[in-house]
Amino acid sequence: MMVEEKMLRSIARRKDDVFIRNEFAALGSEAQVSRALRSLVSRGVIVKLGVGVYAKAKKSVLSGAPIPVQPVAVLAPIALRKLGVKTFSSQLTQAYNTGSSTQLPAGNVINIGNRRINRKLGFGKQTIAYESNHKRAS
């Protein structure tokens, strides 16, 4: 059985919508897994959200192109959790939820606590911005 077929079956059986490349490492060599992932992306079964991060795909009603099954704002915290990063609501979201602000938060912002991260996550024009609790020395 080909690695691509194994991956396709594995993706169909999973309940979660986000996949990390390492989850498929047992199915074949690094080159085989990379080829299979590229093939599944080109077939529209999955979409790439970032380096080594993929999501289940569906066809867009408007364009017919493959898009993630859920918004990037929902998928990104799941992906970061799988990568070992604790995520929290952004400060603007917390202020809105507690009632101390009436302004709705705009954009996709995720608080990553005291960590620093360079990973870019997104799909198309929807990208994720990170905020941290680091205090910069001035």
Image: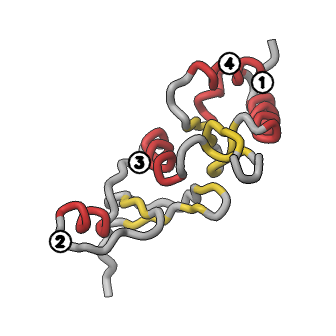
Marks 2 and 3, how far apart at CA:
28 Å
Q: Is residue 84 above or below residue 27?
A: below
Circle nearer the N terminus (1, 3): 1
Residue 138 falls in image quadrant: bottom left
N-terminal of the two: label 2 or label 1? 1
Real-space CA distance between mark 4 and mark 3, rounded to the nearest whole angstrom: 28 Å
Single out the residue that lies furthest toward the front.
62
Q: Residue at x 44, y 48 (%)?
A: 77
The foreground one among 4 and 66 is 66
Secondary structure of the residue carrying numbered label 2: loop
Residue 1 position, x and y percent, is: 80, 11
Say which residue label 2 marks. 100
In the displayed structure, does residue 94 sit left or right of residue 107?
left
> Real-space Cα distance between discs 2 and 1?
50 Å
- Measured Cα–Cα span from mark 1 to mark 3: 29 Å
Left or right of 83? Residue 69 is: right
**Where does label 4 land, which residue?**
9
Amino acid, disc 3: Val
Which residue is disc 3 drawn over?
A: 85
Asked which secondary structure carries label 3, the reply is loop
Q: Is residue 40 left or right of residue 132?
A: right
Q: How far apart are marks 4 and 1 (CA)?
A: 9 Å
Q: Indicate the colouring scheme.
A: secondary structure
Q: Which marked residue is nearer to the observer: mark 1 or mark 3?
A: 1
